[in-house]
Image: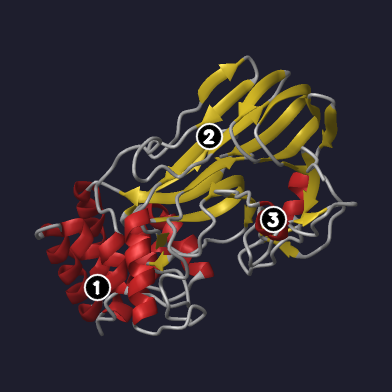
Amino acid sequence: MTTPLFLEIDNTPRDYAWGLVDGVAHVRGTAPTGRKEAELWLGAHPSAPSAVVGEAPWPTLDAWERETGAALPFLLKVLCAAEPLSLQAHPSTAQAKEGFERENALGVPVDAPHRNYRDPHAKPEMIVALHDGFEALCGFRPAADVRDDLQTLAGLIHDSAASAALSTWQQHLGGVDGIRSAFLWLLSGDESLPALVAAVTAVAAQDARFALLARIAEAHPADPGILGALMLQHLTLRAGEALWLPAGNIHAYLRGSGIELMGPSDNVMRGGLTGKHIDTVELDRVLDAREGGDPRLVPQVVSDGIRVLRPTERDTADDPGFELYTVEADGEIALDGPAIALATDGEFELASGDESISVPRGRAVLISRPAAVRINGGGRLFIAAG
């Protein structure tokens, strides 16, 4: 039996605590549910594989992968955040392989809460803002800018224990590899940190210069990641702008809706704003502590109405093997492997040879094999391709 080129797929939104009420429904233009909707997964990830809609030889995309030998090197998501997610970084391909084998050798169960590497794969990510105002923390600020803010806080904090802890933070920042040292100290569990977190939170509630920290503290009270956020770049994206988050990049999405494309991995090293396991030793191994730089990913023009976001690591050892097209008008795309299309506005028709499918707003489609795909319509269509 020949596999149809186009297969409609769907999934159930994930209801994580940080999700936005009716978030995915709003993006897809479907009926509101009144529930938190944090993510919609479109792919073959075994934790929540997409279902194939209608008659097909396979009920889900993980079954499609197993039975056909095809593979999706990505997971496409709709992400809708009402509150800050955890601070986190992800390993490179080499780090993931080594860490996975090491924890296997130690006999750590794959589903253990303290396990760092649940598979031998990297987890690079990109995200495209669907609306103006998508906010994220991404990468470290220049140490000089952080130093200035700590000096400002020193003049506003009058609790002696908190002042002493702030001085320790400043010392780490001023030392060798200061950004790395200072950030990891915040996660060290030092007995002086609770007083410092409380003092900074109190200042932030009153001083507009630190309003972001106050907002983060509302969602994650007493978490040392509040202090870590002060060390990171705060970006607010316009609709269509994108961030690229390669291996080692420390980041956290704060609020807003976006289309996320990532490696289909569960390897996360957390760095605060979470009640989950934090392994500072492993975080130190993967962390990229370089200062500054603009993490925005600039799209390349394919044709009028078609742009593509290609990771900067293409054709290297850390090539993620995926790219993301944004389509707003008629055109054609040559796909080298399976792909997933999702319309968030308007309506499109995809066609190749004598096969075609309508993709109105909210519908997602698997393109099951390499093909030259003709696209007709208007609105906004995302195509994740390997």
Kind of residue sitting beneath label 3:
Leu
> In this orientation, which residue lies closer to the viewer: 259 or 103?
103
Q: Which residue is mark 3?
A: 40
In the image, 11: left or right of 187? Answer: right
Residue 286 on image: x %, y %: 30, 60
Q: Element at badge 2?
A: loop
Q: Position of residue 34 (x, y in %)?
A: 81, 63
Which quadrant is the C terminus positioned in?
top right
Seen from the viewer's position, the closer of residues 164 and 67 is: 67
Disc 1: which residue: 158
Please say if 367 is above or below 137: above
Which-is-in-front pick, marks 1 and 2?
2
Kind of residue at badge 1: His
Give SS at disc 3: strand
Q: Whole-percent x and y of residue 353?
A: 79, 24
Which label's residue is closer to the chain start, 3 or 2?
3
Near mark 1 (Cα within 10 A), the count class, few <14, some 14-19 or many ≥20, is: few
Report which quarter residue 165 is drawn in.
bottom left
In the rendered image, is residue 126 in sight?
Answer: yes
Residue positioned 32% across, 65% down in the render: 98
Front of the two marks 3 and 2: 3
Give the alpha-carbon distance from disc 1 to disc 3, as whole Å.
46 Å
Kindly identify which residue carries mark 2.
Answer: 241
Specify which label sits upstream in the sequence, 1 or 2.
1
- Assign a secondary structure to mark 1: loop
Q: Residues within 10 Å of mark 2 (few under 14, many from 20)?
A: some
